[in-house]
Image (tube, rainbow, N blue to C red):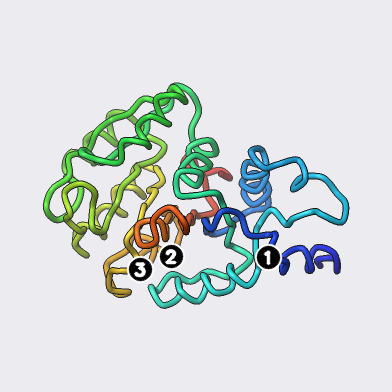
Amino acid sequence: MRSGRDANAERTPNAVPTATISLFRLGRRSRSHSLVESAECGAPERIRTSGPRIRNPWGFLPLRERLALTLGERSIKVSPEQVLLTQGANHALDLVARQLLEPGDTALVDSPGYYPLFGKLKLAKVEIADVRRLSDGPDLDELAAKAANLKPKVFFTQSLAHNPTGGSITPACAYRLLQIAEQHGFYVVEDDPFADVLPAASPRLAALDQLERVIYIGTFGAVFRMRARMAWRMAGSVGCGGGPL
């Protein structure tokens, strides 16, 4: 149970970072603690230390409650306890990369795709392999071939309103993509920056597999620009090799 101080810390406006949010599904205890610890690594000392000014590392509880409802409208089932506030979508991507990847690991990415992510992966000494983007989603033949040959840990993709092509994944492509991910044991990081201007019933990977293998990131930055950015992140409870993430 939370202490009274922790509950109050969650409900104070000071608990809100720069208006960006990350959501993810919590699996085993090792996952939940490691992700929060990763988020705290870049936090100011006043967030991490005890005392009357402490902030809950998960962020502003009423906002997390609102986000859980919003995601439910997109058929993504999540509780407020699974929502983590971050400093932006890039921060969320950084946490995912730090948690899933080590130097020398391979990550698959959309081609063309989100260039700031490529820079993060290169700095982390991660091997990057492109997957061609087609009109209906990633090239699944290329994805399957590279998954078999390169043994990637993760595939970063923007499934809807893809930047820069503008295309969106079809239900058939999304279903097959998840089958390939399951077969080859890698995670899929789904970036969904335009979720608030797209239909709730769009074929999101996170809704199709309910966060068993998909990590979901969304943002308000594409709608409200610099003053209000958000990111959602979700993942399953089993690591790529069958163990805990």
Cα separation between marks 2 and 1: 31 Å
Spatial CA distance of label 3 from label 2 is 19 Å
Amino acid type at mark 2: Gln
Q: Residue at x 32, y 28 (%)?
A: 128
Q: Is residue 65 left or right of residue 6?
A: left
Q: x and y percent of residue 155 in the render?
A: 34, 42
CA gap, disc 3 to disc 1? Answer: 24 Å
Where disc 1 sits, the SS reads helix
163 or 173: which is nearer to us? 163
Q: From what the image shows, is residue 13 above or below residue 18?
A: below
Q: Amino acid at mark 3?
A: Asp
Q: Earlier in the sequence, mark 3 or mark 2?
A: 3
Residue hosting label 1: 13
Q: Are marks 3 and 1 in contact (CB under 8 Å)?
A: no
Which residue is the site of mark 3? 196
**Circle 2 or circle 1, nearest the eye:** 1
Residue drawn at x 17%, y 39% is: 132
Residue 210 image label = 2
- The amino acid type found where label 1 is placed reads Pro
